[in-house]
Image: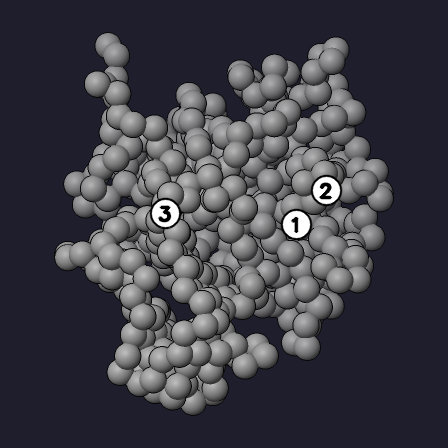
Amino acid sequence: MTTPPVSMHQTLRPQFHFTSKRNWLNDPNGLIYYKGTYHLFFQHNPQATEWGNMTWGHAESKDLIHWKQLEDVLHPDALGTMFSGSGVVDWHNTSKLGTAGHPPLVLFYTAAGSTSPESEGKPFTQCLAYSDDGGKTWQKYSLNPIVPCLAPGNRDPKVIWDDKSKQWVMTLYLDADRFAILTSPNLLQWKQTQTLTLQSSDECPDFFPLKTVRSGKEYWIFSAANGHYQAGSFDGTQFQPIQTPHAIDHGPNFYAAQTWSDLPDAESRRIQIAWMRGGNYPGMPFNQQMSFPCSLTLHSTRQGLRLYRWPVSEISKLWQHTVTFSSHSLVPGTSLTAAGAGELWDVSCTVECTENSHFSLLVNGQTIEWENGRLHCMGTVSALPLKNHKVSLRVLADTTSLEVFGNSGCFSWSGCMLPAASAQEIALQCKQGAVHIQKFTVHALRSAWPPDQG
């Protein structure tokens, strides 16, 4: 029996953030770029709109904007349900799982034992699946698991190639705030080389090198599911942090972020996507959404090394109509309206002000306020100090989410909400102290989903 098509233009369906056509979605998994295609795998329950029956869903895109959901690729088996993991291209066929002219695409996942009747009594172990046809079909490795249980509940293997030590490196969550580093010459045999901690963090590690924007000096970034990260050095076996943990995102709905592997050198980008957990979508056939893909850059600041996040430039493909104001001053009680009712926006403003100023940006019925070096949004308060006597904000507004980026990306905030009951303007308002708007730009966006058929 053929499953009827589902509309991608429902009332609460995000229009430029990825959602599964149907049912539950959570962590992004197995992010691989191969021959012009971005692969996005994700935790998925194909049977219900609640968490459970963990399976890997699969979508692909040529531009990080327009996604096509494909058939699910990893299904529960006797070792467990399919928990989170990562993916790589084994370019040199170190695993011998590829064929002539076709390097294998390899997925690493946790087989979560005892999470299904079939796997009752089994532990959590790390397993592998691969494709020798560019990601069209996948098969699980016949000798799974490749890493035995190292600690109860160990999970979420992140694998990356270290070009300096010429080996594969896996980071793995163990328990509490403990993680492990393992190395391998061939993706099949692994040796643990380190146990490390990331305070007040657990699950979904990511691990990658990144060069600072100005000096080009390379550091390694180690992060966990809550978005906390440390920068440090890595010698091929041991990661040595050089600073205390810092949060990459300050919103209530940012979780389990991962970055794409195997991006070509020509891109010079480290692209990240996260699960925007905890959204509310009553009456919808789907549940949960991904964040918008962002480029990460590393900056040396007075406070130490900091990751900046910024929406990928491909969002310009969705720009429809643009309104821009330049050099406009406001006094308390006045406002500047840039656009009327709508749902999908890319809004930017740069405001000159003082520490005593208080201004707000109204987008989709939500008020984003800056006052005394702090940003207030949807019940949260975060530090966002002036930079050269200015505050710059960028807001991506979808049907059920806001993502806020401050001061060129040194600050990011991700949150989900339900649409406002009535149409709302997009406006800047001055509440205290004179403010000068250097620039205020609003791009109305079109949907990234194709029109419904039939």
Quarter occupied by residue 409: bottom right
List x then y, in percent, for residue 405.
48, 62
- Mark 2, Cα crowd under 10 Å, few <14 / some 14-19 / many 20+, is many
Type of residue at label 1? Phe
List x then y, in percent, for residue 183.
75, 41
Relative depth, front residue between 386 and 217: 386
What kind of colouring is applied to the model shown?
A: one colour
Q: Are marks 1 and 2 in contact (CB under 8 Å)?
A: yes
Quarter occupied by residue 302: bottom right
Type of residue at label 2? Val
Tag 1, which secondary structure? strand
- Res. 207 mark: 1
Q: CA gap, disc 1 to disc 2?
A: 9 Å
Of mark 1 and mark 3, the one earlier in the sequence is 1
Q: CA gap, disc 1 to disc 3?
A: 39 Å
The total number of labels drawn is 3
Of mark 3 and mark 2, the one earlier in the sequence is 2
Check the picture and name the quadrant holding the N terminus: top left
Check the picture and name the quadrant holding the C terminus: top left
Q: Is residue 148 left or right of residue 381?
A: right
Relative depth, front residue between 36 and 241: 36
Mark 1 or 3: in front is 3
- Res. 169 mark: 2
> Up-down: is 180 above or below 143?
below
Tag 3, which secondary structure? strand
Relative depth, front residue between 396 and 303: 396
Identify the residue at image location x=36%, y=47%. 321
Relative depth, front residue between 328 and 407: 328
Q: Is residue 127 visible?
A: no
Identify the residue at image location x=76%, y=29%. 186
- Res. 321 mark: 3
Q: Is residue 414 left or right of residue 175?
A: left
